[in-house]
Image: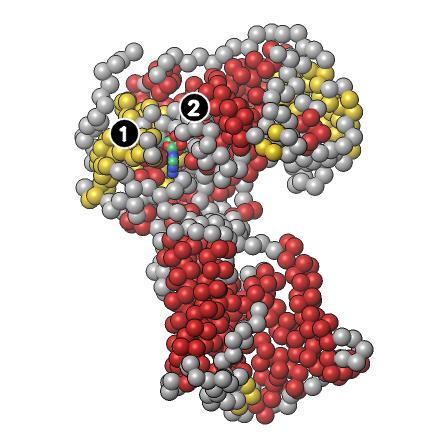
Amino acid sequence: MADIFEILTTLGFWAATLRIVSPLIFGTLGELLCERAGVLNLGIEGIMTIGAMAGWMWVFQGGDLWTAVLFAAFVGGIFGLLHASFTVYLGVSQHVTGIGITLLAVALSSYIFRMMLPEVTTPPKIVPFQIYEVPLLHEIPFVGPVLFSQTPLTYLALLLVPVVWYLLYRTPMGLAIRMAGENPVAVEAQGIDVLMVRTAAVVAGSAMMAIGGAFLTLSAFDAFYFGMINGRGWICIALVIFASWRPGKALIAALLFAGLDALQVRAQQVGGAVIPYQFFLALPYLLTIAAMVVMSRRTAYPKALLKPFRRGDRI
Amino acid sequence: MNQNLPTEDNSATLEEILKLDGITKRFGNLTANDGISLSLAVGEILAVLGENGAGKTTLMNIIFGHYVADEGSVEVRGQSLPPGSSEAAIKAGIGMVHQHFTLAENLTVLENIILGREPLFSIRQKLSAGRRKLRALSEQFGLDVQPDTLVGDLTVGQRQRVEILKALYADAQILILDEPTAVLTPQETENLFATLRSLVKKGMSAIIISHKLNEILRISDRIALLRRGKLIGVVDAKDADRDQLAEMMVGRKVTRPKTQSLKAGAAVLKLENVSTSGASSSEDLKNVNLSIHAHEICGVAGVAGNGQNSLADLICGIRAPSSGSIELMGKKLTRFDCRTVVKAGVGRIPEDRHAKGIIGEMAVWENLVSEDLRQPPFIRGAFLLDKSAGCDHAASTIERYDIRCPGPQAETRLLSGGNLQKLILARGLSRQPRLIIASQPSRGLDEGAIAYVHGQLLEARKHGAGILLISEDLDELLSLADRIAVIFRGQLREIPAEASHDIRQIGLMMSGQEAV
Ligand SMILES: Nc1ncnc2c1ncn2[C@@H]1O[C@H](COP(=O)(O)OP(=O)(O)OP(=O)(O)O)[C@@H](O)[C@H]1O
Ligand SMILES: [Mg+2]
């Protein structure tokens, strides 16, 4: 117990937590945006994968890092559009379409990677984003090295939380998105195109997910591996529920999971002799499930989630 | 009866604001609107009258751009509206209060109203300006609502005010109200009509749909009658009378059935000193005593929200009493759950058709058999549902209760409002319950259907059922009930026999004033 306490006071633990949390923030906010508009996006795992691949490939082909981020977002948006055209315009099952998108995007990532680099055996490396120390701020003791010596994409992730919050709660588009997730008929009765609103939310959300994937190849690591998303997309879906569909809570939820993950790696080294390491690996997931059960019992979920809206249908 | 009614309406004397020309709308092989031409003048209130399923809502949805008409056009001030665009309809000054409200419950009143009234892609929502405008509007028209409460916390009457404010906020010139009074108390209806009159005086025009003929005659200038999708005539309200309208609408003479006196039998329900807790203080029952006998209809009058729901829930086993005892068919009730109660022979006609009544995504036959699922003939073997038996049963029920729908397999949510109500009624009565809890059974029904429902209730009474009739419609209560009790703030008081036809007396008790 005392050991765990000690871990919590180390710089390394907190810096690692912020690194781990970055892709989760992108993914969770992206999923949150989709679901707030009433569309479950199970394509997230695949969209993160193809975002990781696309971003990396862009740089490997000679592009620079920031345009790589944009390119990943663009590719993610395309897959979002695909998801929206099936679920929003055709009203096909959101579960089935989402799983399909994931399978397609994962397979396509490997396919393109193999096709463009048929020869390679070990994944080639690129020069990823470097740590950017924010002038002055990074000298603040403890907080500085944790919060202000990260790669730019981590700052972007943290910045995205208030941005998404502002979008949802302070702009007309955000109101339309929230209402489309509650009662699409009410949106139409106000003269707004529900299908357009939902599509916009799904495309923007998917672009965020893809940036989350690209974080792994452009910031956390320097190469693309198959299966490197490793269930992060699914975790994001759980975190959205945990966060009761609120951006602020989504940050807390993601931080909690990332913290547990960072702790788990370190606790393995301390307690690995007594307790099997698999237990530590499972720990963040177990605690997330437990927290979800406690937290999400009385949350107000978007009432029209999973419900297709068809124009000209009975009101 | 005057058969030479104009079927085209040419009242072009006043300035015309809205014109429908040859509107036709088909759903599959059902023609919901058949070549309807109508016009609306500035400052006029036009009522649209018709049976359940006549196509009234469909027509309004076409005007408002929810549906695209197969033929015909809608013109506002001589400009034709692009079909299928609510945005264009709103821009042209049309506001609609839907039969089933279109509000998001988890959002505030202001948010519900302000959406769509500023450019979608602006960077900042001008909430405080919106709040100011909303406050000014509610003051100007006496429509009192708090901008920042959640819509989910509002009563039905308040929600309707929000819907009207939504239209006013969008500067509507033409207000369409689809059965606005179906869910209102008499007092709320008066307020609504006062509001309507003041709006019209300011130069607005309105179209109102209602099944309550007295209301229509009182509020409207002209009345358009629809039957099975066709416009069968437009009459001036001042020349029309109730019976004539009812006959034109249904196509035959309707008379509400009369009750005949029967000797009451054994008690089927006995409540002794029953109280409930858990609802709001005016909804919780307080020391209620009530008994209902076979061959008897006991009416409960009262303004909505005074404990009617608690009473119905209690008897149907949804809510347990906090004290007191309940006897069903002479046996004391110890377990409070729906199945026990349904088995004991209680049938319910719930008030809120959407929440408690039906599952819209399921087929008509599935909804019709859903209370008898565990019994033959609907069950085959140990657990298989017999679809053809269900469909047969549904087909005969549909026929018997005159439910207008494409067939047993149709999706239930496609039915018109009144036909949904008939479906629920059919399900409740077809199993011949010994105690019937009917909450607002004729809400939203047309004259013909009301006569039918009343006939069915009286029939059930004749066959030995005891009926608890909860209604806000005093005419209904007076014509059906053997005894009337008034519910107010959870207290139930029976009206002495000699005063049981004194409307003034009942009205006073409904508002909580002592009997004089
Ligand atoms: N989207 C739809 N798809 C299929 N059928 C529909 C649809 N909308 C309406 N209908 C059918 O069209 C007919 C007219 O329905 P509508 O809702 O206009 O009736 P109404 O006159 O408003 O009746 P009520 O008084 O019961 O509300 C009904 O038979 C209904 O089942
Ligand atoms: Mg209707």
- Determine whether, in the image, residue A34 is placed left or right of residue B167: right
Q: Position of residue B55 (x, y in %)?
A: 35, 30
Image quarter of residue A234: bottom right
Q: Position of residue B178 (x, y in %)?
A: 40, 35
**SS class, disc 1:** strand
The numbered disc on residue B454 is none
The yes-or-no answer for disc 2 within 8 Å of ligand 1 is: yes
Number of numbered markers: 2
For the residues labelled 2 and 1, say whether their Cβ atoms are less than 8 Å apart.
Answer: no
The yes-or-no answer for disc 1 within 8 Å of ligand 1 is: no
* Camera-nearest residue between A79 and B306: A79
Q: Chain of mark 2?
A: B
Image quarter of residue B192: top left
Residue ID at (46%, 69%): A107
Label 1 sits on what residue type? Asp
Q: Quadrant of the N terminus of chain A?
A: bottom right
Residue ID at (61%, 55%): A299
Residue ID at (67%, 10%): B264
User: Which of pointers 2 and 1 lies earlier in the amino acid sequence?
Assistant: 1
Residue ID at (65%, 37%): B282
Residue placed under numbered mark 2 in the picture: B446
- Determine whether, in the image, residue A218 is placed left or right of residue A299: left
Label 2 sits on what residue type? Asp
